[in-house]
Image (cartoon, coloured by chain):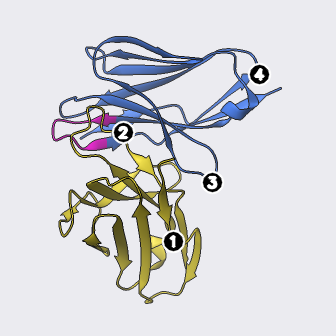
Chain colours: A yellow, B blue
Amino acid sequence: DVKVTQSSRYLVKRTGEKVFLECVQDMDHENMFWYRQDPGLGLRLIYFSYDVKMKEKGDIPEGYSVSREKKERFSLILESASTNQTSMYLCASRVSGSETGELFFGEGSRLTVL
Amino acid sequence: GQNIDQPTEMTATEGAIVQINCTYQTSGFNGLFWYQQHAGEAPTFLSYNVLDGLEEKGRFSSFLSRSKGYSYLLLKELQMKDSASYLCAVKDSNYQLIWGAGTKLIIKP
């Protein structure tokens, strides 16, 4: 079974704290993505990576950074968490060159910033 | 701007048929996806349409009309486990995904 694993399902952090969200996939996929999901809004792309050491800004990168040191691992970093970053964070991966571009998602990390 | 519209919530009865609509206005079109997301779980891929017409996959079918900027997901013989959110997403001219807010489907016995 293909699997995308996110390190923490639930986190509670304080304003100003540094937050690491980790994502690991076991499918040898080249492409990885971080989205946030908020009620009433579609998924919004934060950052994506087409391969190791590569990263591209998505639609809402402000306040976030990412790291892709190994092919299977894509980390999302909140340098100084703020209350407006309270959200569900979804990691996804995809094989490069796929005809459909189907995404495989992790179960999400629900972050609350107090 | 780019926009994907879906109904926020729908209710249907177990055993019945339901159609979830999705209309889109995007800069270019390179395919449309439907994903299913149960509460608290990961979205999972249901279907992909890039040409006009109906794609059938078991109890689920997805239809696309590119000229109308319209798609629907048809669920037949509804089961309680079909209670979930259904997400529509369009791949635009830059091959980026634009997502709708999702339709929450409630199935009643």
Number of other residues with Cα within 10 Å of mark 1, as a class: few under 14, some 14 to 19, many 20 or more: some
For the residues labelled 3 and 4, the Cα–Cα distance comes to: 22 Å
Q: Which mark is residue A7?
A: 1
Do circles 3 and 4 both sit on a common chain?
Answer: yes
Of labels 3 and 2, the one closer to you? 2
- Tag 4–tag 2 contact (CB < 8 Å): no
Q: Which residue is mark 3?
A: B40
The residue that mark 4 highlights is B14
Secondary element under disc 3, as helix, strand or loop, is: loop
Q: Amino acid at mark 1?
A: Ser
Circles 3 and 1 on the same subunit? no
Q: Nearer the viewer, residue B100 or B32?
A: B32
**Dot 2 corresponds to which residue?**
A102
Task: Tell me how far mark 4 sits from mark 2, CA to CA.
Answer: 29 Å
Left or right: residue B77 compared with residue A19? right
Identify the secondary structure beneath mark 2: loop
The range drawn in magenta is B90-97
Q: Residues within 10 Å of mark 3 (few under 14, many from 20)?
A: few
- Residue, x 79% and y 28% (percent of image)? B108
Of tags 4 and 2, the one toward the viewer is 2
How far is mark 3 from mark 1, CA to CA?
15 Å
